[in-house]
Amino acid sequence: MPFYSDETLDEVRRANDILDVVSPYVQLRQRGGRYWGLCPFHREKSPSFTVRTDMQTFYCFGCAAGGNVFGFVQRYENLGFVDAVKRLAERARITLPEEKQGDPGAKKLREDIFAANRQAARFFYQKLISHEGAVARDYLLARRIKNSTIKLFGLGFAPGGGNRRALYEYLAGLGVSDQVMVQGGLVVKTEDERLVDKFRGRLMFPILDASERICGFGGRNFDDLAPNT
């Protein structure tokens, strides 16, 4: 299975406007700065599914499904992350760089990233149910998202505050390498080459592939103004 660089993923994502991708599957109507429609992921009578073109994200206030264009295609088409990337690349007529299928190093890196994502999801969930996650729990409660839904979708909280390396330190303590964290999109490098958490002060949504492995995360600010994916 190929493993694509962040540059390749960004190219594919930019070439696929989320409104254009979602519109053939969901009847959307513009209201304010969002487009609203009936959620394709659960039954509902009034629209709670939204698309924001300024952020290139979708979110359902009914079932808490959310993410970017990759996440939508994964969920709607029941595809793994890589297959969703391929589908969108084909749609945009982008030729993807293919990797040798038998590369053991690349395979191990992928498996290590999946393992790191599982640990990160546990970290985010524990933070959500801790005193640090009170603001996130209040946000969910205000939107009538039940605890059962939180557990079902594995929602979590990426703490903000002064420590910009909370997740990094947690994963490093479990033996996760810097390479895995960087390649998995869990941490980013600052200008001085220091590694810090990519997600901070965000409500977290795990993105699953067809095998129900966590292949990434979507993060949302509580004022709905700044996605972090």
Image (cartoon, helix red, strand yellow):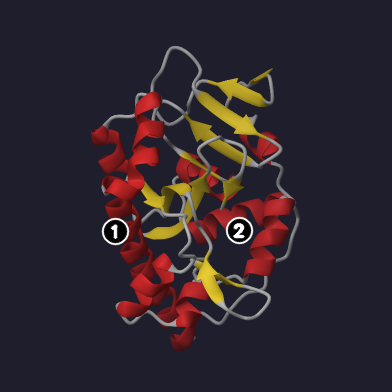
The residue to which callout 2 is attached is 86
Of residue 122 and residue 71, the one placed in the foreground of this image is 122
Point out residue 23 in the picture as x, y percentages from the top left corner: 65, 29
Point out residue 96 in the picture as x, y percentages from the top left corner: 68, 67
Residue 154 versus residue 190 in the image, above or below: above
Q: Count the marks: how many? A: 2
Residue type at mark 2 is Lys
Please tell me how crowded label 2 is: few (under 14), some (14-19), or many (20+) other residues with Cα within 10 Å. some
Of residue 133 and residue 34, the one placed in the foreground of this image is 133
**Circle nearer the viewer, 2 or 1:** 1
Q: Is residue 45 visible?
A: yes
Which one is earlier in the sequence, the residue at label 2 or at label 1? 2
- For residue 200, side relative to residue 29 (left or right): left
- For residue 175, side relative to residue 36 (left or right): left
Residue 50 versus residue 150 in the image, above or below: above
Of residue 126 and residue 35, the one placed in the foreground of this image is 126
Please tell me how crowded label 1 is: few (under 14), some (14-19), or many (20+) other residues with Cα within 10 Å. some
Of residue 189 and residue 24, the one placed in the foreground of this image is 189
Identify the residue shown where x is 44% and y is 37%.
65
Quadrant assignment, res 54: top right
The residue to which callout 1 is attached is 122
- For residue 167, side relative to residue 25 (left or right): left
Point out residue 4 in the picture as x, y percentages from the top left corner: 59, 70
- Asked if the residues shown at circle 2 and circle 1 are in contact, with their CB atoms under 8 angstroms apart, the answer is no
Q: Secondary structure at mark 1?
A: helix
Residue 179 versus residue 143 in the image, above or below: below
Most extreme residue toward the left is: 148
Residue type at mark 1 is Arg
Identify the residue shown where x is 25% and y is 34%.
147
